[in-house]
Image (spheres, grey):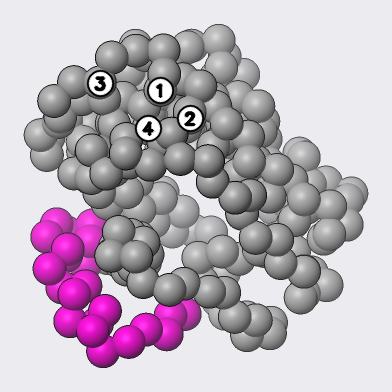
Amino acid sequence: MTQPIAGDFGFTKKLAFDIPKNIVTTSDHMYGIDTVITWKAILKEYKITQVKLGRKIHKPSFPKIVPMFEQVAMTTFRLANQNRHKIVENLNIEAKDPERHDVIDDKFVQAPHRNKIQEIQQIAIRRLDKYKPPDFVNKGLYKKVQIFTEEWTEILSEYLCFLIKNKLNAIQIESLARSIVGLYLFRVLGYFDEISNITTEKTGNILFNQKLLLRKRLITNFRKNTFKN
């Protein structure tokens, strides 16, 4: 739970041969590759489980947060739009709550130095000036430089609903992905505030509850409008 996308996968030979068929864009070849693997396994209904691997220690990836998130967003948005009919088929199916996993590490990411926080704020503001969020996102959700769980799940559900309801081309998907990066950086700042001075276990609860809230809002927001082919 503390590091849901860690880059460590084990999969069958059959899935290994299936994966290249879904690698079609530049982002898919880069940080979007984890998303490609996960989506392929889900859509093909492979059996999926999470395995505890112990503590994962590696070089901090925070300096790469902008290109990393942008590439993941581009691949995720492309796959969501490409498989929109499949998603619609499953929206009305009552799903089980996501499986909870015990925290296996006694440490978690902490907020960086104040100077770094100010740097993130400036990057986010510049991104939002250059790539403005679409009109379907309520501007009141990001009027401050911090976005908390409630606002973030609402923003994500609005983006996902738009991707599911409308057939988009590559340029439109890329534009959407670029526009959410600044909002994500505001969310990072809000998240740092949420986890300040709390335990690792409580941090895990924040992430788990965020997943439940996002699913609930996605279903609610999706049903407000009409699906377009």
- Residue 7 pos. (x, y %): 45, 74
Q: Which residue is mark 3?
A: 227
For the residues bearing labels 4 and 2, Cβ distance under 8 angstroms: yes
Three-letter amino acid code at disc 4? Leu
- Pointers 2 and 3 in contact (CB under 8 A)? no
How packed is label 3: few (under 14 Cα within 10 Å), some, or many (20 or more)?
A: some
Residue sitting at 83 percent across and 72 percent down? 106
Q: Which residue is mark 2?
A: 218
Label 1 Cα crowd, 10 Å radius (few <14 / some 14-19 / many 20+): some
Which mark sits nearer the N-terminus, 4 or 3?
A: 4
- Going by the numbered disc 3, the residue's amino acid type is Phe
- How packed mark 4 is, by other alpha carbons closer than 10 Å (few <14, some 14-19, many 20 or more), is some
Q: Which secondary structure class fits the magenta region best?
A: helix
The residue closer to the viewer here, 221 or 189, is 221
Magenta-drawn segment: 7-29
Side of 196 where 47 appears, left or right: left
Residue 128 circle label: none
